[in-house]
Amino acid sequence: MGKIVKNLRPYWKQVLLIILLLIVQVYCDLALPQYTSNIIDVGLQNQGVEHILPELLTEEDYETSMLFMTSEEKDSFREAYTEEDGLYRRVELSEDQLNGYDEELLVPVILTYQMQSMMDSQESGETSTFTMSEDLSTESDVDPQQLMKLLLSGQLPDETILTLRETVQSQLDAIGSSTLKSMGIAYAAQCEAAAGIDMEDKQMDYMWKTGAQMMGFALILMLCAITISFIASKVGASVGRDLRQKTFSNVVNFTNTEMDQFSTASLITRSTNDIQQVQQVTVMILRMVLMAPIMGIGGIIKVYQTGSGMEWVIAVAVAVLIGFVLLLGSVAMPKFRIMQTLVDRLNLVSREILTGLSVIRAFRRETREEERFDEANRDLTRTQLFTNRVMTLMMPGMMMIMYCITLGIVWIAAGRIDQGYMQVGQMTAFITYTMMIVMAFLLLTVMSIMLPRAGVAAKRIDEVISTDPSIVDTKDPVKETASEGVLSFDHVSFRYPGAAEDVISDITFTAEPGTTTAIIGSTGCGKSTLVNLIPRFYDVTKGAITLDGHNIKEYAMEDLRNRIGFVPQKGVLFSGTIASNLQFGKANAAEQELKEAASIAQAMEFIEEKEKGFDSSIAQGGSNVSGGQKQRLAIARAIIKKPLLYVFDDSFSALDMKTDARLRAALAAQTEHATVLIVAQRISTILHADQILVLEDGKIVGRGTHKELLRTCEVYEQIAKSQLSEKELGLEG
C-alpha cells in the first residue's frame, strides 16, 4: 500500500482536490435520505407542516394555544406572532429558533390539542381515548368544558397549570417523542386550516420544494462524481506513465548483470501487466477508498442525528460483512501471490516459442511446444478460475447479508414506530444510511483483498526502479577529447556474479592503432566475455582495461562507447527502415555516408535490389532479412560511427567466404588508422591479423601471427587443421 501511495506524491494537489470533491459528494449523498424521510413524514403524513407553531392563527386559536402555558411561555409565544387583519401571522424565524419553540412549547400545545379533542368527543357523544380528562376532573372536580372556561378566563394561576401539566406528564412520557411531535404538528395543521390556509396547496408546495432541493443535490453529486472520475483517471494514467518511464529509463541503464538477475520475460511483465494493475488500483483508491471513510463517518453522524437508537444494528452488520470478506480473502489471497509468478512463466514460454518458431518447425517440435504452452496456460487459468470462483461468492453473499440487515431493521423499527419513538420516514432514512455505511466498510474490505495483489505488483516494479546499475559513471570522468585507440588488458580476470570460478583469468595484451588483433578459441572459452568487458557491459573482477592510457572506468560511459564501434555476436536490428538502423551509429548521417558504410559492409548489393533502397522497412528483430544481410547491416552501423576502436564479436560467421574476403579488404582501408579487435571462429577471417590471441578455458595459451602460432601453439594448430588443408595453411613441402 505504501509503495502505491508513494506514486501519488507528485499529484498531491489533484488528490487534495479529489478529497474536497468527495466531501461535497458524500454530503450531497447523505442529504438525500433525509429529504426522502421529510417527504414521507412531513409531506405525506403532516400535510407539509414542519413545526408546532402554525404559520397563521385565528384570534380564537391564538388565545386557546396559550391555555396551558406559563407566563414566560406566553411571552415567548406572543413574540413569535404579529397581528394582521384579525389574524396572527408567525414572524420570520430561523430553523434553530423554530426547533427551540418545538422543544419549549411542545407539552402545552399538546395539552391544548388534547383538550380540544376531548371537547369535540364530548359534543359528538364519543369516548376519548386519552385519559387526561379523568385525571383533570379528579384534580379540579370539573368537566373539560368547565376547565376550558376557567383557563380562558385566566382564573387559573401558573401554579395550578403547572400542577395539571405535571399530572399529565407521566402519561406523555410513555408516548414516544415522534408521536408527541406529530400531535403538535397536527394541532398546527388544524389551526392553519381554520385560519384559511389551503392545506392541499401547502402540501404540494412542500413536496415540490423538497423535490427541487433533492434534484439540486443530485445534480451537484453527479457533477462531483464526474469530475472525480475524470481527475482520478487522469492521475492513474499519469502514475502509469511515470512508472513506465522510470522502469524503462532504469532498465536501459542496466548492465548484463541486472538483466540476468530479472530476466527479459519478467521485465516485460513488470513493465506492462504489473504497472497496469497499479494504475487501475490507483484509480480505485482515489474514487472509492478515499470516499469510504468519509462516507462511513458521515453516515454514522447522520444515523446518530436520527435518534433512532438502533446504532447497534450497524455495528453487527459491519462485523458480519468484514468477517465474511476476510474469510473469502484468506482463501483467495495465497493464490493472488502465485498468480504473478505464473504470468511471468506464461510470458517466458510465449516469448521463447515465438522467438524460436523456425527452430521449432525445423525439429518438428510444434506438438511438444503446444503442450508446454498449454501447461503454463492451464496453470494460470486454474489459479485465476479458483480466485474468480471464490470472489464470485462475495457479491451474492454480501447482498444476502445486506437484505437480511434490511429485514432486521424493518422488524425492529416496526416496533419502535408502533411505540411512537420513530416515524416511517426515519426508518427509511435509517435503512439508507445503514446501507451507505455498510457499503463504505465493504469497499474497504474488498480493497483490502485487491490491494495485496496490487501491492505485489508495486513491489516488483519498485525492485526494478530501485535497483541501481552495478556499473555507473565515475564522479570525475576523463575530459580528454583526443583519442588514438590504444587498448590494453592488464592481468584482467572476470567471473559472473554468484559464480564459483573465473570465466577469464590473467588476460594481458595491447591492441595498437593501425593493427588488427584477433581472438580465437573453442566454444565457451570466454571470447565474447572478454570483448564485452571493453564497452563495460560487465566490469572486470581483477586487473584493469585501459584505453589511451586511462582506465575505462575513468571515462563517462557515453564517451567510452562513442569511441567504440561494437558489432555484437548476434546482429540485432530494430523495426523501422534500413536507414534508421544505420543511423543508430550516427544519428545525423547523410545519405552519402549511409552508402559509403553500406558499400564497405558489402550491403549495397541487396539494398539496391529493394524498391525503396535505404527506406525499405525492417521488421521487428530484422526477421525480413537473412542472417548474412543482418550481419552486414550491423557492421555498416558500426562503420558509420568512424571510431578509432572496432570490436567485431564473431560478426562474419554468417557471411560466405567470398563476401567475407571482400568485406575484410574494404574494411582494411577504412580502419587503416584504427584499432581492430576481431573475435572469430574461422581461421580464414584472421589469417592476416597482426596479433592473434588463442584462448582456452579463459586463459591465453598462444599469442602471435598466424605463422608463428602454427609453429608454437598446438591448440591453434588443431583449430587451423580442422578448417583448412595443409596446403591452404602452407604446411606442405
Image (cartoon, rainbow, N blue to C red):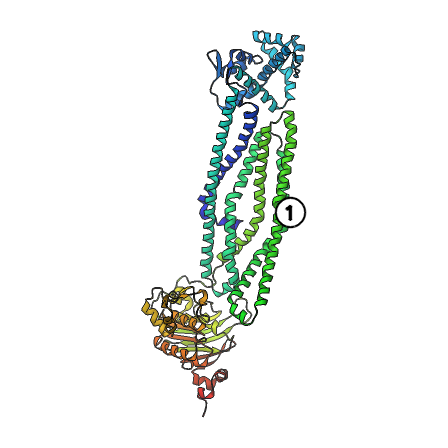
The kind of residue tagged 1 is: Leu
Residue 631 visible in image:
yes
Mark 1, residue position: 327
SS for dot 1: helix
Q: Nearer the viewer, residue 719 or 152?
A: 152
Q: Position of residue 228 (x, y in %)?
A: 47, 42
Count how many numbered circles sit on residues in the image: 1
Q: Is residue 340 above or below residue 106?
A: below
Name the image quarter holding residue 159.
Answer: top right
Name the residue furthest front: 611
Circle 1 Cα neighbour tier, 10 Å, few/some/many (<14 / 14–19 / ≥20): few
Q: Nearer the viewer, residue 382 or 12?
A: 382
Q: Is residue 70 left or right of residue 471?
A: right
Q: Nearer the viewer, residue 256 or 712?
A: 256
Name the residue furthest bottom: 733
Location of the C terminus by quadrant is bottom left
Q: Position of residue 235 (x, y in %)?
A: 46, 47
Q: Residue drawn 58% across and 42% down? A: 442
Q: Position of residue 533 (x, y in %)?
A: 45, 70
Q: Position of residue 137 (x, y in %)?
A: 66, 10
Residue 163 visible in image:
no
Q: Is residue 544 above or below residue 242?
A: below
